[in-house]
Image (cartoon, rainbow, N blue to C red):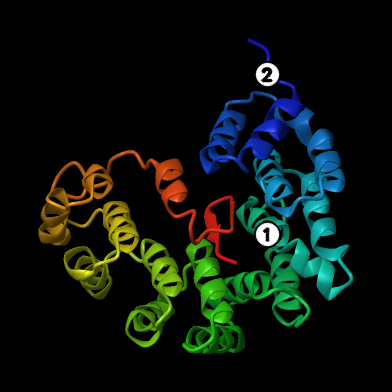
Amino acid sequence: MADPAPEHFFKGFEKSLIRIKFGYQTLEEFKQVENKKLFLDPTINFLETEKRDNVRSWATNLLAMIGGDKAIAALEKLLSEADTQETKREYRWTRFFALNALLRMPQSDIAESKLLNLCRRIWQDEAEDYLARSEGAAILAEKGDSEAFDWLRGMLSEYDQFWPILRSLRALQEVPVRELTDDILAVFSRSNYTDHHYQAVRALRKYPDDLKVLRELGNIVLTNENNYLRLEAVISLGRLADARAQTEIFSALLDEDAEIRNETPNGASGHTRALTCGTYFCRLSHISGQVSPGCTRVE
């Protein structure tokens, strides 16, 4: 059976504007393509001509899956061609996922020193949106850069500001930094923004084998009155797959919200159900101005 034409995938990205699941389905379908190299030039052209950030950003994932020098060059071009603050922030999601795509490239394809230099340039550029800056800082911090680590920790402590914490938490969902676990947990008690709590719950699913994380997520499942936060906490516990969360999992099975019951792991040992991400993203539409690969952007 022949592979679909490139336009098939690009239309799938456009359909994600209607429902997020179409974007994820398109990426899953592309994984099955046998000769991904044939899609390289059409994908680069799509990124050059498509102007909607929340559509074109999906295509960076295709370049990551295609790989090779030309794909890397195209991603680097996306990150270097913007020369104004307005452009960098207008295409914040494309830049965020372009950097993420480079991070996912095999080390044999892109030298670590080159990637880290790019991350440092983006992180230190005050014209960049907090989103890309936070991702660059997280990559550097994970590699032991103390200055980038301190900057990211400072972002997470601006409890009375909306964007710094929101953007840094989103970046940490892609690039977890273990030493920042306590800083993420502090957001629940020190920030009054529900959107911060929501992103923190999502970030914590990348921190396994941490009893403090399990207790915080469990406390949300057992006591929080916000259905959306409880739902995300259940999903996070399922992703962490830790049997120490048995009490919270059983509580979720009795939750008054049917969707929370549906997202409960199948067993007390922490085995997870399939994630119906399209459904819960739609339920969060009242706070989600735009959805892009793997994220909710609240604006």
Measuring 59% from the left and 70% from the top, which residue is drawn there?
A: 139
Whether pointer 1 and pointer 2 mark residues with C-beta atoms closer than 8 Å, the reply is no
Q: What element carries label 1?
A: helix
Label number found at residue 241: none
Measuring 79% from the left and 62% from the top, which residue is drawn there?
A: 79
Looking at the image, is 289 positioned above or below residue 86? above
Query: Which quadrant: the C terminus?
Result: bottom right
Mark 1 vs mark 2, foreground winner is: 1
**C-alpha gap between disc 1 and disc 2:** 28 Å
- Would you name the residue on which mark 1 appears? 93
Tag 1: Cα neighbours inside 10 Å, few (<14), some, or many (≥20)? Answer: many
Q: In this image, 297 relative to 178: left or right?
A: right
Q: Nearer the viewer, residue 54 or 99?
A: 54
Q: Nearer the viewer, residue 63 or 173?
A: 173
Looking at the image, is 125 positioned above or below residue 10? below
- Would you name the residue on which mark 2 appears? 3
Q: Where does the image place residue 80, in percent across and percent down from the top left?
A: 85, 65
| Mark 1 vs 2, N-terminal side | 2
Q: Give the amino acid at mark 1.
A: Trp
Quadrant of the image occupied by residue 196: bottom left
Looking at the image, is 90 positioned above or below residue 125? above
Q: In this image, 150 relative to 225: left or right?
A: right
